[in-house]
Image (cartoon, rainbow, N blue to C red):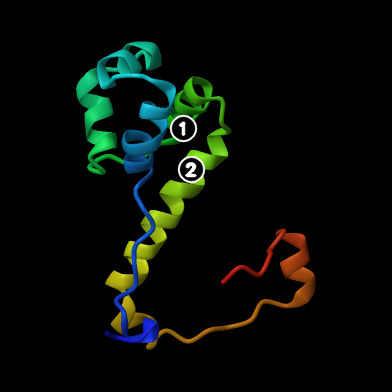
Amino acid sequence: MPHSRDALPVAPPHPGWILRDRVLPGLGLSVSQAARELRIARQTLHRVLAGRAAVSPEMATRLARLSGTAPRFWLERQQQHDLWHAQQALTGILGLIPTHTLPAALQAEIGLHHDR
C-alpha cells in the first residue's frame, strides 16, 4: 500500500457533482424539477451536473437561491476545481517562472491576503 505522500493528488470535486450527488437529493429535487425552478434549460443543468460546464456567477446566484446557500459557496468550489486543474497542467512550467515580492504597502493597498 503506498504512503499518502506517494498517492496521486485528488482534484476538488466539480460543484456540479456536489449539486448532483448531494444537494439535489438532499432537497428531494429531480433534475427536471430543479431546472424548472432555476429557470434554466434542463440541458444547461445537465452540463453543470456532468462537470462539462462551469458554475458562473449567475448560476451560483441561482443555485444559492434554490438551495439556501451563498453564491460564494458555489463560486469557491468552482474556483478550487479550476485552480487545481490549472496547477496540474502547469506543473512543469511553474518552476521556471520567477517569483517577485510586492512591497508590503502595495500588498495592503490592493487587499492582498497571502493564500498561496
Q: What element carries label 2?
A: helix
Q: Residue at x 28, y 70 (%)?
A: 89
From the top left corner, tell me how far across and down residue 80 is, in percent.
44, 56
Q: Element type at marker 1?
A: helix
- Lower position in the chain sequence, tag 2 or tag 1: 1
- Residue 13, given in percent of the width and then of the height, sits at 36, 52
- Answer whether labels 2 and 1 touch (C-beta < 8 Å): yes
Q: Is residue 43 left or right of residue 5?
A: left
Q: Where is residue 8 in the image (x, y as percent from the top left)?
A: 29, 76
Residue for point 53% across, 41% down: 73
4 over 50 or under it: above or below: below
Instruction: Relative to 73, say whether 12 is above or below.
Output: below
Please give the residue where the numbered disc 1 appears in the rendered image: 60
* Identity, as a three-letter code, of the amino acid under mark 2: Leu
Query: Residue 87 or 34: which is nearer the viewer?
Result: 34
The residue shown at (36%, 28%) is 25
Note whether 46 is above or below 21 in the view shown: above
- Quadrant containing the C terminus is bottom right
The residue identified by callout 2 is 75
Report which quarter residue 26 is drawn in.
Answer: top left
